[in-house]
Image: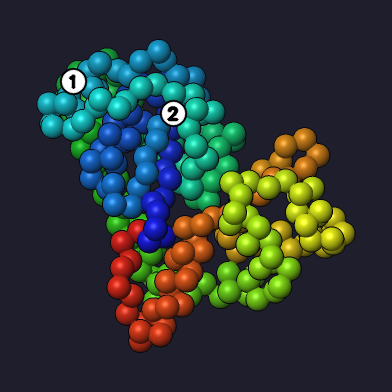
Protein backbone atom coordinates (compact mmCIF):
# COMPACT_ATOMS: atom_id res chain seq x y z
CA UNK A 1 0.00 0.00 0.00
CA UNK A 2 1.69 3.06 -1.27
CA UNK A 3 0.53 5.50 1.41
CA UNK A 4 1.45 3.22 4.30
CA UNK A 5 3.43 0.26 5.46
CA UNK A 6 2.68 -3.30 6.43
CA UNK A 7 2.43 -3.63 10.18
CA UNK A 8 4.51 -6.67 11.18
CA UNK A 9 4.55 -8.13 14.71
CA UNK A 10 7.53 -10.31 15.61
CA UNK A 11 6.51 -12.61 18.46
CA UNK A 12 8.42 -14.91 20.80
CA UNK A 13 7.81 -16.07 24.35
CA UNK A 14 9.76 -13.51 26.37
CA UNK A 15 10.22 -10.68 23.83
CA UNK A 16 13.79 -10.50 25.03
CA UNK A 17 15.96 -11.77 22.20
CA UNK A 18 14.83 -13.05 18.77
CA UNK A 19 11.75 -10.84 18.39
CA UNK A 20 13.70 -7.79 19.57
CA UNK A 21 16.45 -8.55 17.05
CA UNK A 22 13.84 -8.84 14.27
CA UNK A 23 12.19 -5.54 15.22
CA UNK A 24 15.52 -3.69 15.18
CA UNK A 25 16.69 -5.23 11.91
CA UNK A 26 13.35 -4.63 10.16
CA UNK A 27 13.43 -0.99 11.24
CA UNK A 28 16.93 -0.62 9.80
CA UNK A 29 16.67 -2.73 6.61
CA UNK A 30 13.01 -2.63 5.56
CA UNK A 31 11.54 0.63 6.84
CA UNK A 32 10.22 1.43 3.36
CA UNK A 33 7.63 -1.37 3.59
CA UNK A 34 7.54 -2.65 7.18
CA UNK A 35 6.29 -0.94 10.34
CA UNK A 36 7.87 -3.33 12.87
CA UNK A 37 6.75 -4.26 16.37
CA UNK A 38 7.74 -7.02 18.74
CA UNK A 39 6.01 -8.58 21.74
CA UNK A 40 6.01 -11.67 23.91
CA UNK A 41 3.42 -14.11 25.16
CA UNK A 42 5.19 -13.96 28.54
CA UNK A 43 7.51 -10.93 28.30
CA UNK A 44 10.48 -10.40 30.57
CA UNK A 45 11.22 -7.06 32.18
CA UNK A 46 13.83 -6.01 29.60
CA UNK A 47 15.51 -7.15 26.36
CA UNK A 48 18.47 -9.51 26.51
CA UNK A 49 21.61 -7.41 27.11
CA UNK A 50 23.78 -9.69 24.95
CA UNK A 51 21.38 -9.29 22.02
CA UNK A 52 21.44 -5.51 22.48
CA UNK A 53 25.23 -5.46 22.73
CA UNK A 54 25.77 -7.48 19.56
CA UNK A 55 23.18 -5.51 17.59
CA UNK A 56 24.80 -2.25 18.65
CA UNK A 57 28.20 -3.66 17.66
CA UNK A 58 26.81 -3.98 14.12
CA UNK A 59 25.62 -0.40 14.12
CA UNK A 60 21.95 -1.31 14.60
CA UNK A 61 19.94 1.16 16.67
CA UNK A 62 18.58 -0.49 19.84
CA UNK A 63 17.38 2.67 21.58
CA UNK A 64 13.69 1.97 20.85
CA UNK A 65 13.69 -1.63 22.03
CA UNK A 66 11.73 -2.58 25.15
CA UNK A 67 9.86 -5.68 26.26
CA UNK A 68 6.11 -5.63 25.50
CA UNK A 69 3.08 -7.84 25.98
CA UNK A 70 0.79 -8.73 23.05
CA UNK A 71 -1.83 -6.17 24.07
CA UNK A 72 0.72 -3.33 23.99
CA UNK A 73 1.20 -3.31 20.23
CA UNK A 74 -1.20 -2.22 17.44
CA UNK A 75 -3.14 -4.83 15.52
CA UNK A 76 -0.72 -6.29 12.95
CA UNK A 77 -1.19 -7.15 9.30
CA UNK A 78 1.43 -9.89 9.54
CA UNK A 79 2.43 -11.98 12.56
CA UNK A 80 5.84 -13.67 12.54
CA UNK A 81 6.47 -16.15 15.34
CA UNK A 82 10.16 -16.74 15.90
CA UNK A 83 10.04 -20.43 16.83
CA UNK A 84 9.76 -22.78 19.82
CA UNK A 85 6.05 -23.38 19.21
CA UNK A 86 4.91 -19.87 20.13
CA UNK A 87 1.20 -19.41 19.46
CA UNK A 88 -0.61 -16.06 19.42
CA UNK A 89 -4.39 -16.64 19.19
CA UNK A 90 -5.00 -13.13 20.56
CA UNK A 91 -3.36 -11.54 17.52
CA UNK A 92 -5.63 -11.77 14.47
CA UNK A 93 -3.86 -10.88 11.23
CA UNK A 94 -3.97 -11.24 7.46
CA UNK A 95 -0.90 -13.48 7.24
CA UNK A 96 1.05 -15.58 9.74
CA UNK A 97 4.35 -17.44 9.45
CA UNK A 98 6.88 -19.08 11.76
CA UNK A 99 10.64 -18.71 11.28
CA UNK A 100 11.59 -21.70 13.45
CA UNK A 101 14.63 -20.07 15.06
CA UNK A 102 16.37 -21.49 18.13
CA UNK A 103 16.75 -19.16 21.08
CA UNK A 104 20.47 -18.25 21.41
CA UNK A 105 20.14 -17.09 25.02
CA UNK A 106 23.05 -18.36 27.12
CA UNK A 107 24.80 -20.04 24.19
CA UNK A 108 27.57 -17.51 23.54
CA UNK A 109 28.22 -14.77 21.01
CA UNK A 110 28.56 -17.15 18.06
CA UNK A 111 25.00 -18.40 18.59
CA UNK A 112 23.72 -14.83 18.83
CA UNK A 113 25.55 -13.81 15.66
CA UNK A 114 24.15 -16.80 13.77
CA UNK A 115 20.65 -15.90 14.94
CA UNK A 116 21.09 -12.26 13.92
CA UNK A 117 22.30 -13.32 10.47
CA UNK A 118 19.33 -15.69 10.02
CA UNK A 119 16.86 -13.03 11.08
CA UNK A 120 18.43 -10.49 8.70
CA UNK A 121 17.99 -12.93 5.81
CA UNK A 122 14.39 -13.61 6.79
CA UNK A 123 13.58 -9.92 7.14
CA UNK A 124 15.04 -9.24 3.68
CA UNK A 125 12.98 -12.10 2.22
CA UNK A 126 9.77 -10.87 3.87
CA UNK A 127 10.38 -7.32 2.66
CA UNK A 128 11.03 -8.57 -0.88
CA UNK A 129 7.76 -10.54 -0.83
CA UNK A 130 5.86 -7.48 0.36
CA UNK A 131 7.34 -5.35 -2.41
CA UNK A 132 6.59 -8.02 -5.03
CA UNK A 133 3.00 -8.33 -3.82
CA UNK A 134 2.60 -4.57 -4.17
CA UNK A 135 3.88 -4.56 -7.72
CA UNK A 136 1.54 -7.40 -8.64
CA UNK A 137 -1.42 -5.62 -7.06
CA UNK A 138 -0.65 -2.42 -8.95
CA UNK A 139 -0.42 -4.30 -12.24
CA UNK A 140 -3.65 -6.26 -11.64
CA UNK A 141 -6.50 -4.62 -9.71
CA UNK A 142 -8.14 -6.80 -7.08
CA UNK A 143 -11.38 -7.93 -8.71
CA UNK A 144 -12.95 -9.00 -5.39
CA UNK A 145 -12.34 -5.55 -3.92
CA UNK A 146 -13.79 -3.83 -7.01
CA UNK A 147 -16.85 -6.05 -6.82
CA UNK A 148 -17.22 -5.27 -3.12
CA UNK A 149 -17.32 -1.56 -3.90
CA UNK A 150 -19.78 -1.96 -6.77
CA UNK A 151 -22.73 -1.51 -4.43
CA UNK A 152 -24.17 1.75 -3.12
CA UNK A 153 -24.75 0.44 0.41
CA UNK A 154 -21.17 -0.81 0.72
CA UNK A 155 -19.87 2.47 -0.71
CA UNK A 156 -21.86 4.29 1.98
CA UNK A 157 -20.27 2.05 4.63
CA UNK A 158 -16.79 2.74 3.27
CA UNK A 159 -17.44 6.50 3.23
CA UNK A 160 -18.65 6.36 6.83
CA UNK A 161 -15.65 4.33 8.01
CA UNK A 162 -13.26 6.63 6.13
CA UNK A 163 -14.23 9.42 8.54
CA UNK A 164 -14.08 7.33 11.72
CA UNK A 165 -11.30 5.33 13.37
CA UNK A 166 -13.81 2.59 14.11
CA UNK A 167 -17.58 2.15 14.05
CA UNK A 168 -19.82 -0.28 15.89
CA UNK A 169 -22.34 -2.22 13.81
CA UNK A 170 -25.05 -0.55 15.88
CA UNK A 171 -23.94 2.87 14.59
CA UNK A 172 -23.89 1.63 11.00
CA UNK A 173 -27.41 0.25 11.41
CA UNK A 174 -28.60 3.69 12.52
CA UNK A 175 -27.00 5.35 9.49
CA UNK A 176 -28.04 2.84 6.84
CA UNK A 177 -31.56 1.98 8.00
CA UNK A 178 -31.16 -1.67 6.97
CA UNK A 179 -31.74 -4.90 8.86
CA UNK A 180 -28.96 -6.46 10.90
CA UNK A 181 -28.83 -9.46 8.55
CA UNK A 182 -28.46 -7.15 5.52
CA UNK A 183 -25.68 -5.23 7.22
CA UNK A 184 -23.93 -8.49 8.16
CA UNK A 185 -24.02 -9.58 4.53
CA UNK A 186 -22.50 -6.32 3.27
CA UNK A 187 -19.85 -6.28 5.98
CA UNK A 188 -18.83 -9.87 5.21
CA UNK A 189 -18.28 -8.89 1.57
CA UNK A 190 -16.10 -5.94 2.61
CA UNK A 191 -14.15 -7.98 5.17
CA UNK A 192 -13.60 -10.89 2.77
CA UNK A 193 -12.27 -8.39 0.20
CA UNK A 194 -9.77 -7.09 2.76
CA UNK A 195 -11.20 -3.56 2.67
CA UNK A 196 -12.50 -3.63 6.24
CA UNK A 197 -11.25 -5.24 9.46
CA UNK A 198 -13.57 -6.41 12.21
CA UNK A 199 -13.38 -7.23 15.91
CA UNK A 200 -16.02 -8.39 18.35
CA UNK A 201 -16.71 -6.49 21.56
CA UNK A 202 -19.51 -8.11 23.51
CA UNK A 203 -22.52 -8.70 21.26
CA UNK A 204 -21.47 -6.15 18.63
CA UNK A 205 -18.93 -6.25 15.84
CA UNK A 206 -16.74 -3.18 15.38
CA UNK A 207 -15.31 -2.23 12.00
CA UNK A 208 -12.42 -0.14 10.72
CA UNK A 209 -11.38 0.58 7.17
CA UNK A 210 -8.09 -0.54 5.68
CA UNK A 211 -7.19 2.82 4.18
CA UNK A 212 -3.90 1.56 2.76
CA UNK A 213 -5.71 -1.22 0.89
CA UNK A 214 -8.09 1.32 -0.64
CA UNK A 215 -5.18 3.53 -1.70
CA UNK A 216 -3.44 0.56 -3.32
CA UNK A 217 -6.64 -0.38 -5.12
CA UNK A 218 -6.99 3.16 -6.43
CA UNK A 219 -3.41 3.15 -7.64
CA UNK A 220 -3.86 -0.15 -9.45
CA UNK A 221 -6.91 1.25 -11.27
CA UNK A 222 -5.02 4.44 -12.08
CA UNK A 223 -2.14 2.34 -13.42
CA UNK A 224 -4.52 0.84 -15.98
CA UNK A 225 -5.05 4.31 -17.38
CA UNK A 226 -1.29 4.67 -17.74
CA UNK A 227 -0.97 1.45 -19.66
CA UNK A 228 -0.22 -0.56 -16.55
CA UNK A 229 2.75 1.54 -15.46
CA UNK A 230 2.41 2.82 -11.90
CA UNK A 231 4.46 5.81 -10.82
CA UNK A 232 5.10 4.46 -7.33
CA UNK A 233 4.84 0.92 -6.04
CA UNK A 234 7.17 0.65 -3.08
CA UNK A 235 4.84 -0.60 -0.37
CA UNK A 236 2.21 -3.30 0.01
* Relative depth, front residue between 187 and 10: 187
Mark 2 or mark 1: which comes first in sequence?
Answer: 2
Residue at 35% across, 69% down = 135
Q: Is residue 74 left or right of residue 139?
A: right
* Relative depth, front residue between 224 and 159: 159
Locate residue 100, reporting x and y percent.
Answer: 38, 37
Q: Which mark is residue 53?
A: 1
Locate residue 50, reporting x and y percent.
Answer: 22, 18
Q: Secondary structure at mark 1?
A: helix
Locate residue 140, reporting x and y percent.
Answer: 44, 76
* Residue 198 visible in the shown view: no
Locate residue 35, reporting x and y percent.
Answer: 37, 44
Q: Secondary structure at mark 2?
A: strand
Q: How many marks?
A: 2
Residue at 13% across, 31% down = 58
How are the colours assigned in the image? rainbow
Q: Which residue is mark 2?
A: 39
The N terminus - image quarter: bottom left
The C terminus - image quarter: bottom left
* Relative depth, front residue between 178 and 36: 178
Q: Is 138 placed above or below 123 here?
A: below
Crowding near pointer 2: few (<14 within 10 Å), some, many (20+)?
Answer: many
Amino acid sequence: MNAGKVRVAFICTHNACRSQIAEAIARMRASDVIEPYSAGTDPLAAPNPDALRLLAKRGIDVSMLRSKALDEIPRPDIVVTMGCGVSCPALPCQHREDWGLDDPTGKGDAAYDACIDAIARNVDDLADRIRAADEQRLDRPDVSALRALADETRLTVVRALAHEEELCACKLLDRLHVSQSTLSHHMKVLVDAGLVHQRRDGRWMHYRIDADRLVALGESVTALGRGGHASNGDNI
